[in-house]
Image (cartoon, grey):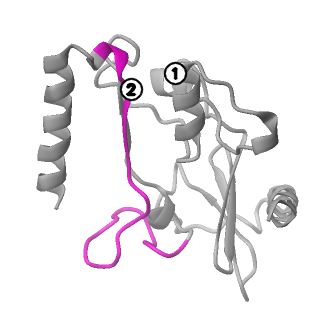
Amino acid sequence: MVGALDDSVGKIIQHLDALGLSRDTLVVFAGDNGDDGRGSNGPLSGGKGNLWEGGIRVPFIARWPGRIPAGKVVDAPVISMDIFTTFAKVAGASIPKSLNIDGADALATLRGDGSATHRFFFWQYGKQAAARHSNMKLLREQGKADRLFDVVNDPGEQTDLAAKHPELVQTLGAKLEEWLAGLKTRS
């Protein structure tokens, strides 16, 4: 599947090049979730259907010749919700405030000019929720105490730092609750 996908994306890029549209076209490739159990997310833990890094950390590749440096690896995170806002910015479209979009313009991050698109990242899936700020991620699963991981230095989420940083658990937990409450008011 990966080979077929790679070939197909290659054909699209070749076609854009042949039409002379590459410098005017931002191409983004992003995965939607982690491995479904038939492969490996190593060294990440978890996979599809959970909020461990193996379930939410996915490839995100952007190509825009002359606008985004080729071959540059950016460590700052973005989230799939940023794609809409970024495309709107590239197209010169404004997004009405009434839409209440979570995404942010990720161009500076993709160029390597800026930090992460958001100060805080949030996820919710079933009875799981997570919040990330900088390197630290709070993971909340029903029936378990909140756990805290440094997902940059410990991408496999092997060392729970909650007991060592209770103030950060409290702060991230409060931010997560605020975000979750906001979801309820939107629906």
> In terms of depth relative to the viewer, which is nearer, 125 or 100?
100
Q: Secondary structure at mark 1?
A: helix
Q: Is residue 8 left or right of residue 23?
A: left
Residue name at image x 52 percent, y 21 percent: 90
Q: Is residue 36 inside the magenta stretch?
A: yes
Tell me the amino acid under the disc marked 2. Leu
Residue 61: numbered disc: none
33 and 19: which is toward the camera: 19
Q: Residue at x 15, y 28 (%)?
A: 15
How far is disc 1 from disc 2 in space, using C-alphas? 8 Å
Q: Quadrant of the C terminus?
A: bottom right
Q: Amino acid at mark 1?
A: Val
Q: Earlier in the sequence, mark 1 or mark 2?
A: 2
- Farthest residue in the top direction? 66
Q: Is residue 1 visible?
A: yes
For mark 1, does the 10 Å Cα neighbourhood hold few (<14), some (14 to 19), or many (20 or more) residues?
A: some
- Please provide percent x and percent y for residue 3: 12, 53
Where's residue 71, x and y in %?
28, 25
* Principal secondary structure, stretch drawn in magenta: loop
Give the left or right position of residue 71, taking residue 48 as reference: left
Residue 26's tag is 2
Which image quarter: residue 85?
A: top right
Which element carries disc 2, helix, strand or loop? loop
Mark 1 and mark 2 in contact? Answer it, CB < 8 Å. yes
Question: Where residue 16 appears, x then y in whole percent?
Answer: 21, 24
Q: Residue at label 1? A: 90
Image point (18%, 18%), residue name: 19
Q: Tell me what residue is drawn at x 80 percent, y 57 percent.
A: 172
- Vertical position of residue 107 compared to residue 55: above or below: above
